Amino acid sequence: MFNLLPQDPLFFDLFEGMGRLAIASAQHLKELTQHFPNINDDVSRIRQAEHDADQLAHKALERLDRTFITPFDREDIHQLVIELDDIIDNIDALAKRFTLYHVTRMEPLFVKQCDVLVEATTVLSDAVGQLRTTHKLADLNPRLIEVHRLESIGDDNHHAAISDLYGGSHDPLHVMKWKEIYDYVENALDGCEDATHVIERIVLKNG
């Protein structure tokens, strides 16, 4: 069905827009760690990106409902939209916790996770962009493999962070706050890998 792309590029425009917003959200989160504790502007930028992503997701699903012939399976379009939106939602929910929970210091392992998230969203966005032009898994595999590698690094960071939290040197309130924050960034990284699984399925079906 890839020969239909020139007639209806809007889905790809929307996917790519959401990919760019995922990168922007991750970059704003990284900037939040650099600007801490003066983070209000960064939180606002992440909130705006989340709002913009919701609009693109809504537009994509509306288009899906109205379009008879789609570039690939409807369930895959729907799932890719949901996965990209969830990444940004997790970043937004995470950023809000810093003010909601009155966090007083930045954790070095969280900074590392944010660096990994910026890389993962960037590679994912590149893979999303390739859907417009290729139906060969070999063309996409380097990016899909790289997202998986970055998610594995994120897992290692997450395990180290949780081990530190429960090591007995932190007060219980600190542990509760940071456990949730670490889980959100881990969910965002998992979402990047989940999105690559959808991309892989799309290419295998349409190759």
Image (cartoon, rainbow, N blue to C red):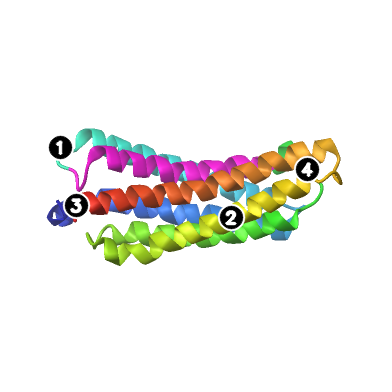
Q: Earlier in the sequence, mark 4 or mark 2?
A: 2
Q: Nearer the viewer, mark 2 or mark 1?
A: 2
Q: Nearer the viewer, mark 4 or mark 2?
A: 4
Distance, label 4 to label 2, CA atoms, is 18 Å
| The disc label shown at residue 68, or none | 1
- Percent coordinates x, y for residue 63 in the rendering: 26, 39
Which corner quadrant of the image does residue 100 belong to?
top right
Distance, label 4 to label 3, CA atoms, is 47 Å
Q: Is residue 142 above or below residue 16?
A: below
Q: Quadrant of the C terminus?
A: bottom left
Q: Amino acid at mark 2?
A: Gly
Q: Are marks 4 and 3 in contact (CB under 8 Å)?
A: no
- Percent coordinates x, y for residue 26 in the rendering: 56, 55
Q: Which residue is mark 4?
A: 166
Q: Nearer the viewer, mark 4 or mark 1?
A: 4
Badge 1 element: loop
Which corner quadrant of the image does residue 139 belong to?
bottom left
Q: Is residue 175 above or below residue 24?
A: above
Q: Is residue 135 magenta?
A: no
Distance, label 1 to label 3, CA atoms, is 17 Å
Q: Earlier in the sequence, mark 4 or mark 3?
A: 4
Residue at (44, 43) in percent of width and height: 85
Q: Which residue is mark 3?
A: 206
Q: Amino acid at mark 3?
A: Asn
Q: Are marks 2 and 3 in contact (CB under 8 Å)?
A: no
